[in-house]
Amino acid sequence: MTARDQARTAAQRYSAERHDAVDPGPSLPDRLTAARERKGVDLIRAERETKIRVRYLSALESGDYRDLPGAVYTKGFLRNYAIYLGLDPEDVLRQWRRERGEATAPEPVIVPPRPLAEPARPLNFSPSIVVAALLTVGVVLFFVYLGAQLLRYSRPPDLSVTNPAQAVINVDESTTSFRLAGTSTDGATITILTPGQEEPYRTTAQSNGDWSIQVDLRRGQNRFEINAVNPETGKQAETPRTVVITVPFLEIQAPTLTVTAPVDGTKYGNGAIAVEGTTTNAKTVSVTATLQGSGAKAPAATAGPAASGAAASGTTINVAEDGSFEFPPLELTAGRWLITVTATSDQGQTATRSINVEVAFSGVNLAVTIRGGPAWIKVWVDGQLVGPQSGRVVTAGKTLTFHGATSVEVRTGSSGYTQFTLNGTSIGSLGKSGIPETWLFKPPDPPVKTQRT
């Protein structure tokens, strides 16, 4: 029986005698061998690193303790070998004692000295080595720079478009411009061509490669050909980019027009003709009156009592928010008239209505217009006072209309600021500014100055 077998038999016998013992597991030689194999070293390398001879290490792993110099050295070898293999040295020593059948009382341990590590040798550089190294680094850097320059001059500029993200997009119908953006080589010139524009858009890529430019859009399809040029080499991007932006056309609706007054074919006893109605899809409405048979347009007209100004032939007004419109009354002379009303949209589309009316004056129809400054007036219709006994002050631009069976008499505080239109015929002012006068209108007689106050 070998010493190893004897050690195992003794260990088993010792374990059986202890009632509180547990399964001892592998023997110490097996533990040492397994630990070394896990570490991945052989006995020769272990000898070199632990400074323990190979034959002693082999004796420890085979259990041949008789080949060892003695118990004291064996303990020292086991402790150092256990530390080297990553095992608990005290546990290894206890197992060694158990397997030998010895008591577990502590014994003096002699630890052999650990091997001394050879100090690192300092690096010594001679001046020639330093110079050679610097020259080598300089040559390498030069060739790197030269290669970079050659690559730079031989390579065309990069080009990409980041806005819009897609090459073909549709935008809102109200869009009139768009900002194109992307990346390219630092300093590259970005050119953008679009049909119908002689000069292309141009911009320069920034130091980080970003570029952007605002371009105009028109309704329909807008096509942009984008390219990048290296200003130093003249090389263009290998793959130019194309962006198509479509602005939809507005759906233009023609205006509609309804004239509620005057009514076609109506015969009026005075020339104050109101023009009103409604329209859709229109911004402005204009009115024109033409005397039939003569081709003459209506003279400057006056408005009724509720109006603040006069409407003339060819007058244009804005349409109200609800689509309605109302002109101050047209003051027309006797005869047959063609009144033309035209509604116009923002896009220039129009709608027109024509109305025929006849003006046949009866009695006295007098329009009084104050121009140049305010004027005090007092009026008698058919001999009866109209309004307050003291008269009233009328502001400049105001027009009042009076109708009588036989006569209308007007006293004004400023004859030059007071203008008259009798039965559609403009008479103008009959005196001078600042001069109070009274005038009697009784057609077919001409106006007569009276003394009524």
Image (cartoon, rainbow, N blue to C red):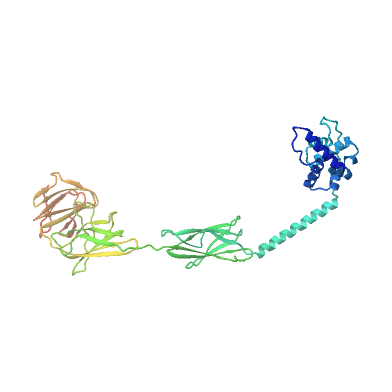
Is 175 left or right of 327, judged from the image as shown? right
Residue 427 sits in quarter: bottom left
> Camera-side residue: 107 or 247?
107
Is 183 left or right of 108, judged from the image as shown? left
Quadrant for the N terminus in the image: top right
> Camera-side residue: 59 or 199?
59
Q: Residue furthest top?
A: 105
> Camera-side residue: 5 or 106?
5
Is 371 left or right of 411, judged from the image as shown? right
Instruction: Residue at 50%, 67% (x, y): give it.
Output: 198
Q: Is residue 121 above or below residue 218?
A: above
From the top left corner, tell me how far across and down residue 14 is, in percent: 80, 35
- Residue 132: in sight, yes or no? yes
From the top left corner, tell me how far across and down residue 184 is, in percent: 59, 60
> Camera-side residue: 250 or 102?
102
Q: Residue furthest bottom?
A: 293
Residue 361 sits in quarter: bottom left
- Residue 432: in sight, yes or no? no
From the top left corner, tell me how far across and down residue 337 is, in percent: 18, 65
Figure disc tally: 0
Q: Is residue 89 above or below residue 360?
A: above
Is 427 left or right of 246, judged from the image as shown? left
From the top left corner, tell me how far across and down residue 369 is, in percent: 20, 53
Instruction: Residue at 14%, 57% (x, y): give it.
Output: 365
